[in-house]
Image: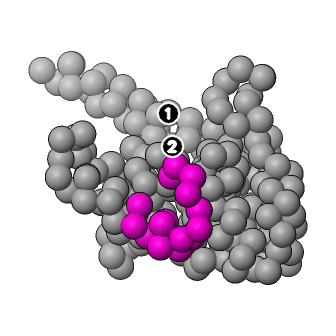
Amino acid sequence: MKTQLRPMLTLFVLLMLVTGVFYPLLVTGIAQLVFPYQANGSLLKVKGQVLGSELIGQDFSAPGFFWGRPSATSTNPYNAYNQEFLTGSSGSNLGPLSQVLVNNVQERVSLLRGSSKTNTNLIPVDLVTASASGLDPDISLTAAFYQVPRIARVRGLTESAVMTLVNQYTVKRQFGILGEPRVNVLKLNLALEGIK
């Protein structure tokens, strides 16, 4: 028994050190050297002040800003992890026959219709349904274009000026084939505020 116990414990300690200490330190060190921006959360900073992450959706609800995709973590779009309220990334697990889902979508439709009464376009699905993580930083071009009239009216800008800004911040498909064109809501709102 003792002859088996010692090699087993030695192997356990060795593997624990390799997989639990050395490997994570190595990967973290390489990430900090090669990809420091990404390794530290892709944080957008202006004059040393962190304004948010380009990878995690932010909560924008003022009428003069582009609104992101709703979050399943709360009634507000993009409620990133908050230890005080124990919120974070999560899906709702509501199916297409769920009355709660139907009610949530109807509330969001009413909010969008109420914020832009003259806009008769169809409301894009990504403005009324939450994603699996609830933290999407991007919206579709259709969702951005839907919000242009409201933002132009509230900010006293022309719709073409706001459309130009949306087009300027549009991210194309990766390699021309992967994904859909999209707009990062935080970057677009910072550009609206004149922060580039």
Q: Which residue is located at x 64 percent, y 29 percent?
A: 179
- In what element is the residue under mark 2? helix
Mark number for residue 44? none
Foreground of the two, 121 or 60: 121
Determine crowd level at label 2: few under 14, some 14-19, many 20+ residues with C-alpha closer than 10 A: few
**Residue type beneath disc 1:** Val
Q: Which residue is located at x 59 percent, y 68 percent?
A: 118
Marks 1 and 2 in Cβ contact (< 8 Å): yes
Q: Is residue 8 above or below residue 187?
A: above
Residue marked by disc 1: 18
Residue 106 appears left or right of 57? left
Residue 90 appears left or right of 175? left
**Residue type beneath disc 2:** Val
Determine crowd level at label 1: few under 14, some 14-19, many 20+ residues with C-alpha closer than 10 A: few
Residue marked by disc 2: 21
The picture places residue 108, in percent across and down from the top left corner, at 40, 63
Tell me the colour scheme of the image: one colour
Distance in Å between CA atoms under marks 1 and 2: 6 Å
Quadrant of the image occupied by residue 73? bottom left
Q: Is residue 167 above or below residue 70?
A: above
Q: Determine if residue 173 is in view.
A: yes
Foreground of the two, 100 or 121: 121
The picture places residue 48, in percent across and down from the top left corner, at 81, 76
Quadrant of the image occupied by residue 65? bottom right
Q: Which residue is located at x 76 percent, y 42 percent?
A: 171
Assign the C terminus to one quadrant of the image.
Answer: bottom right
Q: What is the magenta range?
A: 109-123
The picture places residue 151, in percent across and down from the top left corner, at 69, 71
Assign the N terminus to one quadrant of the image.
Answer: top left
Q: Which residue is located at x 87 percent, y 64 percent?
A: 161
